[in-house]
Image (cartoon, rainbow, N blue to C red):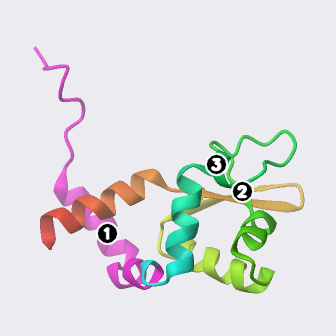
Amino acid sequence: MEDSNYSNPIDISEIFDIIKHMEPIEVFKALANESRLQILQWLKEPEKHFVPHEGIDMRTIGVCVSQVTEKLNMTQSTASQYLSILQRAGLIKTERIGKFTYYKRDEDKIKEVAAFLNSEL
């Protein structure tokens, strides 16, 4: 009988394969900027940091670049560039609804990065 305390153990070899495809250097580059780290922190609990668009659940859909731009107090092009870097590193996901693109953390990828760091460094 399976122990209910241990659901789906992590297969480290799968995580290493995923990280290898994510290009670890890109993850580290993305995390090497204070504003990008701040974005990831804000996206962890978006309801504490952003005013939602009408009808948008920020936990499931994400936040729009204009919300991030306003919070960072930077230009939209800079905020878009930061979000693009985080996306290329695999740390956030996007969803397009109408004319808006929404960004949210990719919690599974972030956990995989944490497991990689814990086991390799």
Instruction: Reply yes or no: does residue 103 show up in magenta.
Output: no
For the point 66% across and 83% down, the residue is 81
Estimate the spatial distance between the alpha carbons at disc 1 and disc 2, rounded to whole Å. Answer: 25 Å
Q: Nearer the viewer, mark 3 or mark 1?
A: 3
Relative image position of residue 92 (x, y in whole percent): 55, 63
* The quadrant where residue 18 appears: bottom left
For the point 27% across and 66% down, the residue is 17
Amino acid on which the number 3 mark rests in the picture:
Lys
Which quadrant holds the N terminus?
Answer: top left
Comes first in the chain, label 3 or label 1: 1
Q: Nearer the viewer, mark 1 or mark 2?
A: 2
Which region is colored magenta?
1-30
**Residue beneath disc 3:** 48
Estimate the spatial distance between the alpha carbons at disc 2 and disc 3, rounded to whole Å. Answer: 12 Å
**Residue beneath disc 2:** 63
Q: Is residue 53 above or below residue 30?
A: above
Q: Main secondary structure of the magenta part?
A: helix
